[in-house]
Structure formats: C-alpha cells, structure tokens
Amino acid sequence: YVPGIEPPKPQNLSLMATLARYLETYPPGHPLHVEHPWFRQFAALDATTAYLVVRGLLVLAGVGLLWWWRRPWRSETIAFDLPRQWAAVCALVTLVAPQCWKQHLVMLLPAGFLVLHDALQAPTRPWGRCACLAFTAFVMLLQQDIMGRATYIVVVSYKLDTFAALGMLATMLAGRGRSGQAVRQQPSPCQTAAIAEADRRAA
C-alpha cells in the first residue's frame, strides 16, 4: 500500500466501491475479502477492465441525469426542479467520492425530505410512503450493534446502504414530474392578478 493512504475496507459505501464489489473477485488475504460463510463474489474482471467499466457506468449515470434535467429553469417549475437538483448533488457528492462511510450518508437527508414531502402531498399513492419505510428500515436495522461485527461486515460488503441511497434518489427524481405538472396547471400570482383584473373590467 502507498504510505499515508488508507487501505480499502468493506465498509466503503461509495458508488465506485459498490460497482467494483460486483465486478471483481477478491482472493483470500485481500483487504476486501471477508472470511464468512455468507460472503459471495460475482464477476471476476481484472482490475483494468473493472476500472474502465466503473468509470463508464458513472459517465452514463451523469449523462442520464443531464438528460433528465435537460429542461431550462423557468419561473413555473424552478420551485420543484431546483430543490431536487440540489438534493441530488448533495447525495452524489458523497456517493461518487472515492470513500464514503455510513455516517456520510447524512447527505441524503435533503433527498429523504423531498421523498417524504411527495408522499404526504400524494396520499393516494402509497408507494412513496412504502419507499420511506424501506429506506428507514435499511438505515435503522443495518447496524453493528444489532447484528454483531462479523455479520455486519459481511452484510455491509454487499453495499445495501448504497442501493437504498440510490433508491431514494430514484424515488425523489420520479416525483419531479408529478410536482412539475401540478405546478404548471396552477396560474402564477401574476397570472391570477391579470385574470382578476380582466374579470373586473368585464363586469
């Protein structure tokens, strides 16, 4: 290892570490190999190929977000688009970093707030509330004090917290379209005043 550089750990929840976990195979003795009956590995790409695949997937994710946010900011939609973009950037600052420990996932709180807000604004759509409960269960139950250190290390190596964070982001972004459509159906204060003035003159 390079002096001064912290060795890799299974507890790293960054998006790069998550993708590498499912693309590479770590031999016994490797810092990311967990000696536990529940530990399973999947693809066995070499380090260079895995590096290129991970970077390619991150670029595709970035392009996807740019496409999703391709609309320009307008006065009738900025109240809904800007908070979601800000919350997504806060989350990605943590997830895209080379190292992301569980305590860093507090950066998902803005996204969680918006998911909960959407769930309360649309009580006839229970999937938002179910998503909130699922994310809360992941955060509250995947704890070392509850599971024991050995079990916790092997469970956290599967990066379930990262998948929960990505699910929260997807749920938040899915709510953008509904909110944007709802606000566009309502006239702005200026339009309301103009309509009232037109009605007054017509009377």
Image (tube, helix red, strand yellow):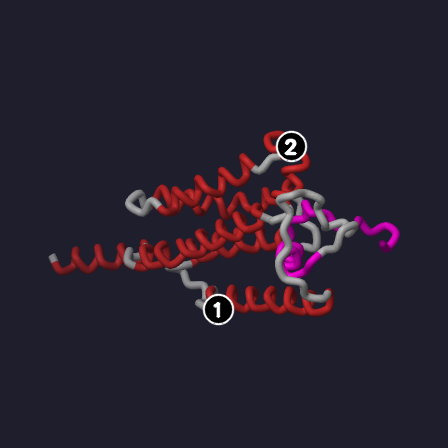
Q: Is residue 118 left or right of residue 91?
A: left
Q: Earlier in the sequence, mark 2 or mark 1?
A: 1
- Disc 2 designates what residue? 148
Residue 134 visible within the image? yes
- Asked if residue 47 lies in the magenta stretch, the reply is no
Q: Would you say the residues marked 2 and 1 are in contact, meaning their CB atoms lie under 8 Å apart?
A: no
Q: Callout 1: few (<14), some (14-19), or many (20+) C-alpha neighbours within 10 Å?
A: few
Q: Identify which residue is drawn at 63% across, 51% down.
A: 40
**Quadrant in the rendering for residue 97:** bottom right
Q: Is residue 19 left or right of residue 34?
A: left
Chief secondary structure of the magenta portion: loop
- Asked if residue 14 lies in the magenta stretch, the reply is yes
**How many numbered badges does the structure rendering display?**
2
Q: Nearer the viewer, residue 97 or 140?
A: 140
Relative to 76, residue 87 above or below: above
Q: Position of residue 146 (x, y in %)?
A: 59, 30
- Magenta span: 1-25
Say which of marks 2 and 1 sits in front.
2
Relative to 16, residue 138 above or below: above
In the displayed orientation, state which residue is furthest to the top: 145
Q: Nearer the viewer, residue 76 or 134?
A: 134
In the displayed orientation, state which residue is furthest to the left: 203
Mark 2: amino acid: Gly
Mark 1: amino acid: Trp
Say what secondary structure mark 2 lies in. Answer: loop
- Disc 1 designates what residue? 67
